Image: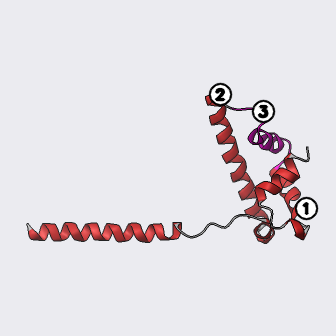
Amino acid sequence: MIRWRERKLGAIAAACLAVTAISAPAMAEVRQVDGDLWMQSTAEQKQAYLVGVVNVLAVNQALRQKRGTADASDPLSRYLAAADQQSIAQMQASLDSYYANAANRSVPVLGALWRASVAAR
């Protein structure tokens, strides 16, 4: 009986250590994507970021439409309307142009995307 408890406690301790080891990298600080990080990124990284943003917005919009809470004038709808009007490469070029001005580098990418793609339309 004692050996069974020792094994069980050992297994639990090992599981706890494994969870701690796995979750430690997840606790690392996630940096805000701003103009400095944008300009340091490769074209592929920029496009992957934009595809991810558009996909998240589209899923959110679909959920809002399903619930009947979508509004064509809200910021989310306006982001998606702007995304429908241009390619990912065009969005990237707009952001690259926006961040070419060093004074804009502290602006988060979503804010710059709004200024360069949504508000400009």
Which is closer to the viewer, label 2 or label 1?
2
- Tell me which numbered mark, 2 or 1, is placed earlier along the sequence: 2
Q: Mark 2 points at which residue?
A: 68
Q: Mark 2: few, some, or many residues within 10 Å (few <14, many ≥20)?
A: few
- The residue stretch that appears in magenta: 70-87
Residue, x 68% and y 38% (percent of image)? Answer: 61
Residue 24 is left or right of residue 3, and the answer is right
Residue, x 65% and y 41% (percent of image)? Answer: 60
Kindly indicate whether the residue at mark 1 contacts the one at mark 3 (C-beta within 8 angstroms).
Answer: no
Tag on residue 72?
A: 3
Q: How far apart are marks 3 and 2 (CA)?
A: 12 Å
Residue 17 image offset from top left, x and y in percent: 36, 71
Q: Which amino acid does label 3 sit on?
A: Ala
Residue, x 17% and y 71% (percent of image)? Answer: 6
Residue 111 or residue 60, whichever sits in front: 111
Q: Mark 1 points at which residue?
A: 97
Q: Distance between the residues labelled 2 and 1?
A: 37 Å
Residue 28 image offset from top left, x and y in percent: 56, 70
Residue 46 image offset from top left, x and y in percent: 76, 61
Q: What residue type is labelled 1?
A: Ser
Kindly indicate whether the residue at mark 2 contacts the one at mark 3 (C-beta within 8 angstroms).
Answer: no
What element does badge 3 sit on?
loop
What element does badge 1 sit on?
helix
Q: Mark 3: few, some, or many residues within 10 Å (few <14, many ≥20)?
A: few
Q: Is residue 77 magenta?
A: yes
Residue 121 image offset from top left, x and y in percent: 91, 43
Q: Is residue 90 magenta?
A: no
